[in-house]
Amino acid sequence: MSSAGEIAGGFIIPVVAGILNGSWNAAFSPAANLAVAPVASDQPSSEKDPNPRQYDLSHHHAWVLFQFYSAVANIILCLFWAGGPARVSYIVSEAPSSSVWLIVLFSILMGIGILLFGEACRISGVGMGTNLTIGIILILGTLLPLGMNEQVATPSGGMIIGGVVVSCVGLFFSMRSLQIRTKEEHIDKKLTVSTSNDEVGDGTESVSNAKMGDAEEGAAGTTESTGDSPEEPKTDEPKTNGPKTHSTFLKITLCVLAAVFSSTLQFAFVFGSDLIKIAESPDGPGSTPKSGSAAIIWLFVIPLSTISSISYGLYESRNTPIKHLWRSPISRHIKIFIFACIPWIGHIHLYGIAANLLLPPHIAAAVAWPILMSTTVAWGMILSLKLGEWKGASADAQTKQKLGLGLLAIGIVVVMASVALYDK
């Protein structure tokens, strides 16, 4: 049984991991001037422009670098955390080949899930895409370890499920608040464009501002929403870069597929248990610390899961010269690594420490996972409030947003309380 100190650490670490996971995507907001430059419509790119900004990163190129640097950093970290190259080579050679290939398979499937998550946010809007997908991941990622450890019908298992239900209700209210705010923003943009067309000399500027606003929405991660918008009437007005209308069936299907594929991460650990057992044994060259036993799985998962995202990012940026990747300002690379890669890699390994070392073994993953995912969404909502992105939103939208945040906090507390009912 874990000590009180270990349990406390098992609660605190997933919360910290959730804050990191809810922060890294803010680096891709143009307003942050970190991974990508601020939007500047009056400063077009030109090959004759001596300003080095002409080689600055597009959103997709920045994403490619983020995935690449994350994979490299993770390989170096896990290789030595697991005991060094010789130790890793021994573990892989001694493990059944079927286990290794299943880890490879589920790592690639997880990468596809991450890619589908991005598409779900683009088509469904960040509000619906994020909250619906994370809600499903929250449920699948909690029920899977509970079921495999036969803890579903126990008092602690019941309380964990209750906490997850409360969190999912909070996600629903968060999604509704974002949808309401998005509709309000689109209505305001239409009114701005319509009004500007009646004013001599102001029409072009207002349309440009509307386009700029849409561009910021597409790159702002969880802090901006581009979801359900009213049907655009056919007019002769200048077109803005607003989202296309997609069917509800397509939106929900993408969210479900993204969640299912992303949840295959759990299977990588289930079928990779042979490698973890070998890592924990004293046999072979070198040794693996207890905290690094799961590093052998992450050594496969993170690099392999980046393949689909890197490929897609390069494809989407095919009209931008690839030399921008290495001719962009070195400061961009440093900012991507510090503000995106470190939080992303950090949250993954912090979650692993809590789930593998600190919490009661039979319910560890089922406790740490919902705390991590709920905190991720809650922190994104808090950042959104702190950045003033809800100024001007209706009272209905703000009320639902705060209700969602409160329910997520209650859900986290209920999941934490489940440990008190655990009986091995």
Image (cartoon, rainbow, N blue to C red):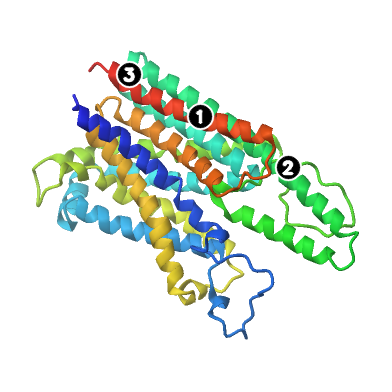
Give the percent coordinates (x, y) of residue 140. Answer: 44, 29
Residue under label 2 = 184
Location of residue 348 by image quarter: top left
- Per the model, the C-alpha gap separating discs 2 and 3 is 45 Å
Residue under label 3 = 151
Crowding at mark 1 (Cα within 10 Å: few <14, some 14-19, many 20+): some
Residue under label 1 = 406
- Per the model, the C-alpha gap separating discs 1 and 2 is 23 Å
Judging depth in this view, the residue of 85 and 197 nearest the camera is: 197
Tell me if 240 is positioned left or right of 45 in this view. right
- Per the model, the C-alpha gap separating discs 1 and 3 is 27 Å
Q: Secondary structure at mark 3?
A: loop
Give the percent coordinates (x, y) of residue 59. Answer: 55, 62
Judging depth in this view, the residue of 54 and 362 nearest the camera is: 54
The answer to whether 228 is drawn above or below residue 70 in the figure is above
Give the percent coordinates (x, y) of residue 360. Answer: 24, 26
> Which is nearer the N-term, disc 1 or disc 3?
3
Which mark is nearer the camera, 2 or 3? 2
The answer to whether 345 is drawn above or below residue 124 in the figure is below
Which mark is nearer the camera, 1 or 3? 1
Q: Secondary structure at mark 2?
A: helix
Which residue type does callout 3 highlight? Gln
Which residue type does callout 1 highlight? Gly
Crowding at mark 2 (Cα within 10 Å: few <14, some 14-19, many 20+): some
Crowding at mark 3 (Cα within 10 Å: few <14, some 14-19, many 20+): many
Which residue type does callout 2 highlight? Glu
Q: Secondary structure at mark 1?
A: helix
Q: Residue at x 53, y 46 (%)?
A: 386
**Can you see residue 283?**
yes
Tell me if 242 is positioned left or right of 388 in this view. right
Give the percent coordinates (x, y) of residue 207. Answer: 78, 61
Location of residue 272 by image quarter: top left
